[in-house]
Amino acid sequence: MMPETAKKDNSRLLDIKNLHVHFPIREGVLHRNRSTVKAVNGVSLILNRGEVFGLVGESGCGKTTLGRAVVGLAPITSGSIVFNKKSIVRLTGQEARKRARHIQLIFQDPHASLHPRKTACDLVGVGLKLHGLANGYEIDEQVLAMLKRVGFNAEHLYRYAHEFSGGQRQRIALARALVLYPELLILDEPTSALDVSVQAQILNLLKELQQEFHLTYLFISHDLGVVRYMSDRIGVMYLGHIVEIGSTAHVFGKSQHPYTRILLSSLPSIDPDTPPDREVLEGDPPTPIDPPPGCPFAPRCPEARDLCRKDLPDLIQRGDDAGHLSACHYPHIS
Amino acid sequence: MTQELLLKVEDLQVRFYTLRGVVHALERVSFHLNRQETLGLAGETGCGKSVTARAILRLIDPPGRIEKGAIHFEGRNLLEAEESEMRRIRGSQISMIMQEPKVSINPVIRVGKQIAETLLIHNKSLNGRTARKRAVDMLAQVGIPDPEKMSRRYPHELSGGMSQRVMIAMMLVTRPKLLIADEPTSALDVTIQAQILELMKTLVREIKTSVLMITHDLGVMAETCDRVAVMYAGNVVEMGSVRDVLKNPRHPYTQSLLQTVPDNANPDQPLFSIKGNVPSLLEPQTNCVFAPRCEFTMDRCVREKPKNYAVTGGHQAACFLIEDRGNQN
């Protein structure tokens, strides 16, 4: 169906199995009540080499924590992450450093992720220095080449990070990641701090770079329009669980999970003639602090039945398509 | 329905006198708002949407200054009003919902008291108990469950969506004639945004207020507004009914802006992107502000500044292309 699938070799790059990331917290006046924030609560996910996997969900659903766990920035409670056939759970020292070379993370807010008092050259070159990939003049050459690729000139090389605009900073962050030639790039809401016209520039650049550098993207975003445009496959997260996973066309066109359907209908259309036929979800998203048993979406789901409140549904194939999985006892299957 | 004029902003100019130079925040902003109408103010960061809102309430602090223009509200020019009169108008006639509910609500005063306070300030004859009762009723009206109990909560005990409901209650309890909503849903998740937009639509109809909706989200605009004004670098470049502007945009900037939205884009093709960057507001504007980035730039565009030219009744754009076409017809 898609010509791109032929180009990709479908070898697994990243294999996440039953991943849990829990944070213990203490509440109350004397911090006596112990509870657990289950940010990621049993997520399994496979990323194939060369694909763009979009991870969507609302704030607090655990999508950022999942991305951070892969690069080792969140403590993994249990589960496994296999990258290039090697486990990357709880790495330290040399091993962790090696992982950092192959898996890079782009943060949401480029104003916070770049040191304002370092020059573009310093920021992009530091990775090369740390990993011992280049010395002396080679560093400057490689840095300049990469900065040129993302749209800068030699005159920008010695400017400070604070002199750049939001979109420019995000391009510096990209150059900093790509100068190491990583295999996997985790993009955590890379455009949500930017205006739409700047966002379009960055998204185009990301698509070009993905082809050029043969990158695999884990693209985390709450913006469904952006994820649809960028991704080959999509995973929908709710309260630490993946509730639906499948190709972009399937998840958007034939969504099975009620949460996905409501999420898609909540998105305002820019066509004033489309009548808003939306299902408005009651209530707020629950906190991931000691979530109740059963389906995580059951308390807000308009279609919840008794079984949903007792039993956690498995993420399995429920329709005709082998790659389209959902975690719902009563999925919509057309 | 007769279209009765509520607010008319004419040639509003606001400048900020900073150490780096004069920032031409608003150059020429004109628009009007009828009673019981929702007007959207669209544009990207730094185009002057929020400055316009603050100027209407006369909340521009030094080094900013309203240089010239007029803001007619119910026939009265607010720029000539005394400060004491403005204080009476703010909160009772014109209210403003801010983007971040958590930042604009006082964290150490109970929610119910804060809402009642607004009433008491603007209506001296009201007693405390009635005000508090009205506050609780208002909380119920914005869909807060168990309003009696919730009115005794502190703002930090509420979620983002709930805080925004409280904010809306606080602003609508005085039944203002004009509600300015500055990005009311940008800080919220999509499912919560859907709730808040529905709520605002219902309340606006019930209270019969007009809304100036400021947003960068064209989807939100399409869904909530009757008319739209598009701003770019301190100028209103296009204005018209929401259908005219979004379906038949005539200003090249509006056309480009709509094409950069990835929602309905074909993933196999690169997104349209506007070349260049937003101009510096430090330089005085003598030409069309969009000329350096426009695909259709003519000699004229870099020499003089276009006026607003009518496309059809009520739909206008500040672009010479429209004027030329108009001459041919």
Image (cartoon, rainbow, N blue to C red):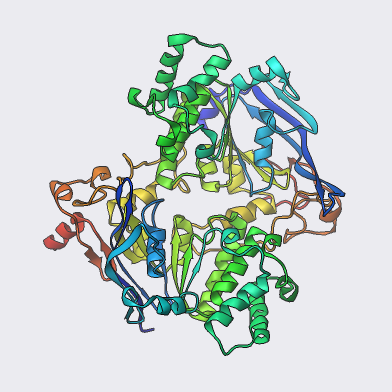
| Image point (70%, 32%), residue name | A69
Quarter of the figure that contains the N terminus of chain A: top right
Compared to residue A34, the image places residue A98 above or below, namely above
Q: Position of residue B61 (x, y in %)?
A: 40, 61
Seen in the image, is A213 located left or right of residue B9?
right
Q: Outermost residue, bottom direction?
A: B125
* Residue B70 in the image, given as x and y percentages of width and height: 29, 72
Determine if residue B203 is in view.
yes
> Across the whole image, how many numbered discs are drawn on residues?
0
| Left-right relation of B143 to B86 | right
A208 left or right of A264? Answer: left
Of B204 and A207, the residue lying toward us = B204
Residue located 68% across and 15% down the image: A94
From the viewer's perspective, is B90 left or right of A21?
Answer: left
Q: Nearer the viewer, residue B164 or B198?
A: B164
Height in image: B323 above or below A169?
Answer: below
Q: Nearer the viewer, residue A56 or B203?
A: B203
Task: Determine if residue A321 is in view.
Answer: no
**Where does residue A265 sit, x and y in percent of width and height?**
58, 57
Up the image or down, A211 lies above or below A141; here it is: below
In the rendered image, residue A76, in percent from the top left (x then y), is placed at 76, 32
